[in-house]
Amino acid sequence: MAAYAFLAFALVILIMLGFPVGFGAGTVSMVGAGYFFGDFLDPRTSSMIARLAFAKINNFLLLAIPFFLLTGRLMNVGGITERLFGFVSVVSRPLKGGLGHANVLASMIFAGMSGAATADAVGLGTVEMRAMLQEGYDRDFSAGITAASSLIGPIIPPSIPLVAYGVIAEESIGSLFLGGVIPGTLMAICFIIYVSYRARRGNYPSGSMAGIRELLVSFRNAFLPLMTPVIIIGGIYGGIFTPTEAAAVAAFYAMVLGLLFYREYGWRHLMREIKGTMIDTAVIMLVIAFTSAFGVVMIRGQVPDALAALITQITTDPTFLLLLFTILWMIVGCFMAETPAILILTPILLPTAEKFGIDPIHFGVVMTVALTIGLLTPPVGMVLYALIPVTELPFERLAVLAIPYILLSLIVVALTIIFPELVLWLPRMIMN
């Protein structure tokens, strides 16, 4: 078992040194399989890894990932993000710091379309920053809330990290999506409260109440984009289609809006977005394939059993266990994006959590929320890097601006750990 634990440690070192996650996991898996068979040159070693890798990516549910990625891309280039933000900015204009509130609300709506934080930060974030700076908001405040609001994307359904977790853990994607609704909403509420505090302290502007005509015009412009999350969520839980089919419908709907209805781009641009989606999907699938093989190797090495035995000596309280795991997730999130981290850690940690009586849906949502915070923490901080050209601020400054929002997000993690029903109530009520 010690040899397998060493392999897990070796993978962590490779990732910290900048080795690609997929290739690192594949290399370590090959070494582990060779150790299992007692001969690194045994043909069964490569055969085992290839078989395990292919078996996991040969899954219909994973088709949801490229379709959700494509949906986010098409929403960003199809003029849809501008229409969404235009509507919520009109609604929130009477509030002090209204565009800060609009920033959070727009991200909540966009989260119901793409399921990815970077798509929110790059696409919607550009619109949000431009609008806030034009209205006189200082650059630091605008950049901070733009970075923080993008965290809602991977939590509120649909969520690409939750799809990945559901495939690895073999849990219901629909239940996981529902489990993310309340935590994601709580995070948005925390951000809105903080925006209100900053708005009063900084005396940020508030506007006049929108007239009925202006409100109706902005709603009409945003109506078709607003229907996207309704189609996705309503279709899934109305029994019309599966999460994978919902992702395909959403991508087709986004294409129709941008290409034919709004005519924001042509066929050539559409092909470019599809090509980009294919490249992103290939990277994700490579990571899923080899991290899945790595997980099986760790299980055959009885690493989860050894971990459970070790933790039992420390605590038998499931709440305290999740708090310990949260510390681990926060550390891992500093060096790795949330989806690869979920793929690597789930096979190792989930068996231990289940032995402590923790519901797999609760475990998956809490892990996703905790790892998502890593998008704002150095040295990796993918959202921070994505926002450098958008905000025109250096990485170090963005990391400092994100601190209050990281603390608020940790409060949400703590609440979901202490009160599991915040995650489990909706899945139990609707899925049952």
Image: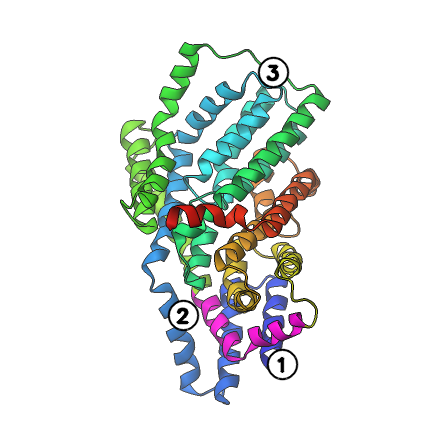
Quarter of image, res 259: top left
Q: Which residues are magenta?
A: 289-312
User: As rendered, which of 178 and 334 lies closer to the eye?
Assistant: 178
Residue 250 is situated, as x and y percent measured from the top left of the image, at: 33, 41
Foreground mark, 2 or 1, reads 1
Q: Is 299 one of the magenta-colored residues?
A: yes
Mark nearer the N terminus (2 vs 1): 1
Q: Considering only order in the chain, which callout, 1 or 3, is on the residue closer to the N terminus?
A: 1
Q: Label 1: which residue?
A: 2
Residue 152 in the image, given as x and y percentages of width and height: 53, 41
Label 2: which secondary element: helix
- Per the image, the residue denoted by label 2 is 53
In the image, is residue 23 above or below residue 119?
below
Q: Position of residue 377 (x, y in %)?
A: 65, 48
* Amino acid identity at mark 2: Ala
The residue at the point 59 percent across, 27 percent down is: 100
Residue 159 within the segment the image draws in magenta: no
Q: Is residue 367 above or below residue 25?
A: above
Looking at the picture, which amino acid does disc 1 mark? Ala
**Mark 3 belongs to which amino acid?**
Ser
- Residue at 64 percent across and 29 percent down: it is 195
Give the residue at mark 3.
206
How far apart in space, not on screen, are marks 3 and 2 (Cα)? Answer: 54 Å
Quarter of the view holding residue 56: bottom left
- Residue at 53% x, 26% y is 102
Q: Does residue 188 sit above or below 426 in this rendering?
A: above
